[in-house]
Image (spheres, helix red, strand yellow):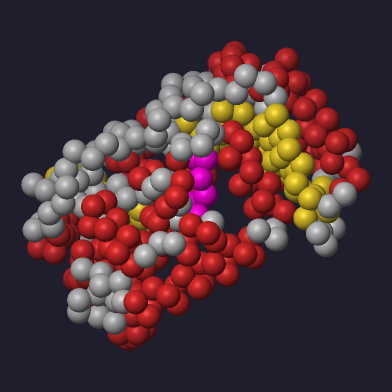
Amino acid sequence: MSHPITPENVTRAELSNGIVVLVKENHTNASITLRGRLRAGAMYETDATAGLASFTASALQRGTKKFTFQQLNELYDSVGMSFGTGAGTEIATFGGKALTEDFETLLGVAEQVLREPTFPDKEIEKLRGQIVTGLREAEEDTRYVAWRKFQELSFPKGHPYHRSDDGTEATVKKLTRAKLAEFHSRYFRPDGAIFVIVGDVEAQRAIDLVAKHFGGWKGKKGIAFGIPPAPAPTRALRQDIGLEGKIQSDVVMGYPGIRRDDPDFYPLRTADLIFGQLGLSGRLGENVRDKMGLCYYVYSSLQAGIGAGSWMIGTGVNPRNVDVAIQAIGDEVRRLRTEGVTPDELSHAQDFLTGSLALRLETNDGAANTLADMELYGLGMDYIVRYADLFRRITREQILEAVQKYARLEDAVIVTAGPAV
């Protein structure tokens, strides 16, 4: 069987400054996708500087030594190119697309944005205003409010997952231009950086061009990259938040989860798919939404990354049904813990996992993001070759064991946000 990504058809090179370059040639059309990861996420913030990584990443394109914000946008329009940057808790990301003939122009833009931002005061203040407006709007959204409080209660103060990547209105207002420039100088660096290029380019030429634009990039080395484990809760916890003028309540509930490199990832990922995602949101959708009519939407999600996130459930309900919906979801969790999954459910989930990956890898974007994650999590260049077996060999017994270990209602954090009572 042929695989779209194998050790033989991906070229991997490491530059002397620590940048890893991965190239997958695809000459079916004259375009190239660039995707990257940098160790410049919100894990390096404090509670007082929450939002700094995201603000910094968003500000990079607001002006560089060679381009103003307007000039960058005009350049993108003139050649049909795109480029963007962002930051989450663990990493900062960058990426873009260009026609084959404009690939070096794209790398030149990436060099300017990532290495030479100028953080012009006027643009920074405009961006700050946009971020603050977004945060104010989010604080009126029951789904966002429930999720934020769930994170705060699930992880202790000071832990990276306790904070919002976007920060708060109070913290963002205090983030000075100097703080943005300092964060960029310290954390936007080649050490641990991943550059993935997929498309109509020869591998060695792509590597040479990355070396041309980024080989001389220097930065601090040896900065720790990791998320500390969080203490497991010792009892269930519930908090209800009232918001004026709302007609829907949102509920988020869950428990401590696992890291991406945990051996339990594959059985728990399969369980999560069956429980709250497959089809129209798995068992939860079939039973709590469709059969019982208790919610507008419901899903589960396993947050497994560099650190151990949460295994959580989210639902939107009529305010009158909040307690009944929580009880019904709890009943489904107990059933999953007691009965596990059926042979048909497992087979369906395995088919979906393998089939959806194949579809994702058909595009340059999908292949590039998959390769970036393979490098980030140390999955190995043969990961796609092994992928189907990793899930096909999961047994119902392994799933039951993992579910019983992690789906602990006795330790669940439950948050509701809805009409004030």
Q: Which residues are magenta?
A: 161-167
* Residue at horizontal 54 percent and vertical 34 percent from the top: 155
Q: Is residue 162 magenta?
A: yes
Whether residue 166 appears in this view of the structure is no
* Residue at horizontal 17 percent and vertical 47 percent from the top: 220
Residue 12 vertical placement versus 287 (above, below): below
Location of residue 22 in the rendering, given as x and y in whole percent from the top left corner: 23, 49
Left or right: where 264 falls relative to 296 = left
Residue 47 vertical placement versus 77 (above, below): above
Quarter holding residue 395: top right
Q: How many marks?
A: 0
Q: Quadrant of the N terminus?
A: top left
Judge by depth and name the residue closer to the eye, 388 or 338. 338
* Residue at horizontal 26 percent and vertical 58 percent from the top: 182
Location of residue 116 in the rendering, given as x and y in whole percent from the top left corner: 21, 68
Judge by depth and name the residue closer to the eye, 378 or 165. 165
Q: Is residue 318 magenta?
A: no
Location of residue 379 in the rendering, given as x and y in whole percent from the top left corner: 33, 33
Residue 153 vertical placement versus 147 (above, below): above
Magenta segment's dominant SS is loop
Judge by depth and name the residue closer to the eye, 294 or 116. 116
* Residue at horizontal 23 percent and vertical 52 percent from the top: 186
Location of residue 30 in the rendering, given as x and y in whole percent from the top left corner: 29, 70
Whether residue 167 appears in this view of the structure is yes
Left or right: where 389 falls relative to 112 = right
Judge by depth and name the residue closer to the eye, 387 or 400. 400
Left or right: where 411 falls relative to 113 = right
Left or right: where 160 falls relative to 104 = right
Quarter holding residue 207: bottom left
